[in-house]
Image: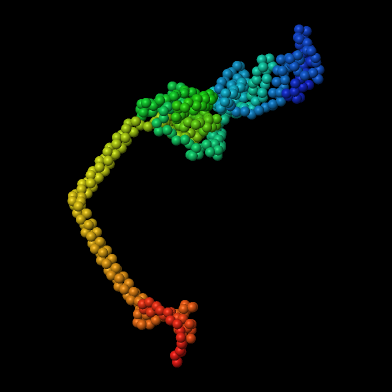
Amino acid sequence: MTDAASSATDSTSERPGTPEQPGAAARSAGPGAAKPAATGPGVPMSAENPWPLRVVSKKIGDWLARLGEVWTEGQITEISHRGRTVYLTLRDPSAEVSMRVVDFTGAVAACEPPLRDGAQVVIRAQAQWWDKNGSLSLHVREIRQVGLGELLARLERLKKLLAAEGLFAAERKKPLPFLPYRIGLITGRASDAMRDVLKNAKARLPSADFEVREVAVQGPRAVTEVCAALAELDRDPDVEVIVIARGGGSMEDLLPFSDETLCRAVAEAVTPVVSAIGHEPDTPILDYVADWRASTPTEAGKKVVPDLAEEQRGLNISRTRLRQALGAMLTREADGLAAMRARPVLARPETMLEARGEVVANLQHRMRARVDSRLERSTDELEHLRARLRSLSPQSTLDRGYAIVTDTETGAVLREAADAGEAIEVRLAAGSLRAAVVHTREDEQ
């Protein structure tokens, strides 16, 4: 690179992301290079004023140099030695991300125990950009293996985090179907775990239908492949339960099943998930997140389907009990019906009517007697009242010879002779008469 291009690069490297005017760099490209239409700091970069590739590469290197040293973590998937230089491939266990790592300092050789594929490491490194071929790598300054104690501490922190978010709560766990139409199985390729699940499930229910996905169950690709298989089976509407199975192994071998990405994917699945990882003592975090935990793949095969023979026996027992209960009920009802038919009232029903007829006749007789007595008493009371009424009537007084005298003009009943006018009317017991008053006389007191 010419001095002009270097100076142009340096002048703009203070502001990453700010386009540099490529006048000097373009002029240094040689006589055969296309001459830009215009140059200078005020001319924007365009198709007519492009940056040379070496300038772009140099700028990328300058930007990465500002990053400085970084600490990062990953899993080693490949180690190769070329003389004293060691080349590693560092992979993120939860994503399809990997990067080349170069060791010129002997940091790899100083590791105890020696590094191997699949080891979990933390490195301090500097990002380096190779201008010539445009490649990026990390140059190791320090490398540390993640020990068992630290792994356990990290898993415990992750377990507490997921528990606090409610991923272990019993109320969010989905029930397993009694008789699933199709069962999804995620397991290792041609593994014993797959054979155990299929063998035990088919022994209990020969018609059990499985949708098997064979994936890596340890190593750097395990999490990615298991998550992809889980997503695929979860989208299948015919799959009603998913089993994730793996045989036993060391804690490091089972680490993918304690990965946060996989645990969250299982928690978000719509289909119920059964975790069947390792043996009884093995408890990866997936066991807490799954809807049901099987201690072994064998137990998972027995759990996801019912035992056909056992269900048939239960059905036969229930059928026998139902038949016995129905027979006993029919016998009891028949005996009750026979007892009712044997009663005299049902043998000669008219006796019940005769008894009721006597009761009705007795009631009628008592009713007539009461009515007659009431009528006789009422007749006597009426005659008595009639006699009293007659004794108080004015007519009875007239019948005894008395008369009622009234003034003809006023119609008033006369009680004293002095009240009489010129004419009076005399009412007798039978008829009445008029008379003229000739003379009045008052009786002496």
- Residue at image location 69% in from the left, 16% down from the top: 131
The answer to whether 105 appears left or right of 387 in the picture is right
- Residue at image location 23% in from the left, 46% down from the top: 337
Q: Quadrant of the N terminus?
A: top right
Examine the rendered structure and indicate whether residue 102 appears above or below residue 360.
Answer: above
Q: Furthest residue to the bottom?
A: 444
The percent position of residue 309, horizontal first and vertical second, equals: 32, 31
The percent position of residue 224, horizontal first and vertical second, equals: 53, 25
Examine the rendered structure and indicate whether residue 186 appears above or below residue 438.
Answer: above
Q: How is the image coloured?
A: rainbow
Q: Nearer the viewer, residue 336 or 291?
A: 336
- Quarter-wise, where is residue 9 in the image? top right
- Quarter-wise, where is residue 178 in the image? top left
Examine the rendered structure and indicate whether residue 411 appears above or below residue 89.
Answer: below
Q: Nearer the viewer, residue 364 or 17?
A: 364
The percent position of residue 38, horizontal first and vertical second, equals: 80, 14
- Residue at image location 29% in from the left, 35% down from the top: 316
Q: Nearer the viewer, residue 26 or 443?
A: 443
- Residue at image location 43% in from the left, 27% down from the top: 183
